[in-house]
Image (spheres, grey):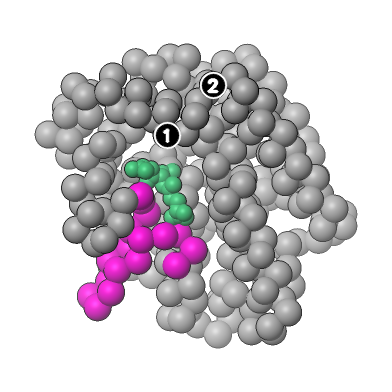
Amino acid sequence: MKLLTINISHYCEKVRWALDYLNVEYIEEHHAPPFHRFYTKKYGGKTVPVLVTKEQCFCDSTEILHYLNTIASHDKKLYPHNIKLRSEVEELEELFDSKLGVATRGLGYYFALQNSWKIPLTWSKGALWPEKIGCILVAPLTIKMVRKKYRVNETQKDLAIQNISNIFNIVDKRLAPDTKFLVGNKISAADISFAALAAPLLRPKNHPIYSSQHANLSQEMSDIAKDLRATRSGKFALNLYEKFRVFSN
Ligand SMILES: N[C@@H](CCC(=O)N[C@@H](CS)C(=O)NCC(=O)O)C(=O)O
């Protein structure tokens, strides 16, 4: 299998984690914005991640996890067999994808764009040299598009902080002090989605891409991250990374 990614994308990390957890063999092909579009377009998508198998391709992280579930062994299903539990997992995954992932990305870009010269270097990590160079050359234009597309501004920043806090509260309420997983007694797509999509702020130690060092974050972002890490759901996500973020490749 081939996984098309932009290195730092947390939706890509969600899929990478699922593939690693299931011990599926795959090759990750890193692309740098805006050049990822040449490749995603070939498979009928726009965004990353895209998973390409011998027979099919999938252009959305949730679609990919559903596909992976069909090839997962019985003891490692990402979605429980029980219909009620399965729909709980699916509802949580949808909430995290549509609200948490959007908010952590928006907030991440709000702070990252304060040092915008660094962005093409981060975007292009792992990409081939021609793409790296292209990414740096067209970065001013790409950054302008990102600002517009993800509405990176002060109002959206406040809204993102509010949305993140709301979702962390929802998760807090589901977690009793000894709860290991969001649904049922095994790690599921809900746990993976929550931890991967919160990771740009939580900066877990075992993350394959983000550094857990807060030294290179702005003071304001670092303060937000510290507060989130101290919540019950923050600790829960950090623990998921520590105990369950295995690597197959
Ligand atoms: N719903 C999609 C969202 C993926 C997504 O938004 N990916 C972003 C990176 S975080 C992307 O590819 N952005 C570049 C673009 O829109 O061209 C999924 O879960 O796969």
Decide which of 169, 231 is in the foreground and name it: 169
* Mark drawn on residue 153: 2
Q: Amino acid at mark 2?
A: Asn
Mark 2 C-beta to ligand 1 under 8 Å:
no
Q: Residue at x 26, y 61 (%)?
A: 44
Q: Which element type, helix, strand or loop, lies under badge 2?
A: loop
Decide which of 81, 213 is in the foreground and name it: 81
Tag 1 residue: 149
Mark 1 C-beta to ligand 1 under 8 Å:
yes
207 vs 167, left or right, is left
Residue 15: image quadrant is: bottom left
Residue 153 magenta:
no
Q: Amino acid at mark 1?
A: Lys
Q: Residue at x 67, y 61 (%)?
A: 92
Residue 2 in view (yes/no) = no
What are the residue bounds of the magenta stretch? 47-63
238 vs 207, left or right, is right
Report x, y in % for residue 196. Answer: 55, 49
Q: Which quadrant of the figure contains the C terminus?
A: bottom left
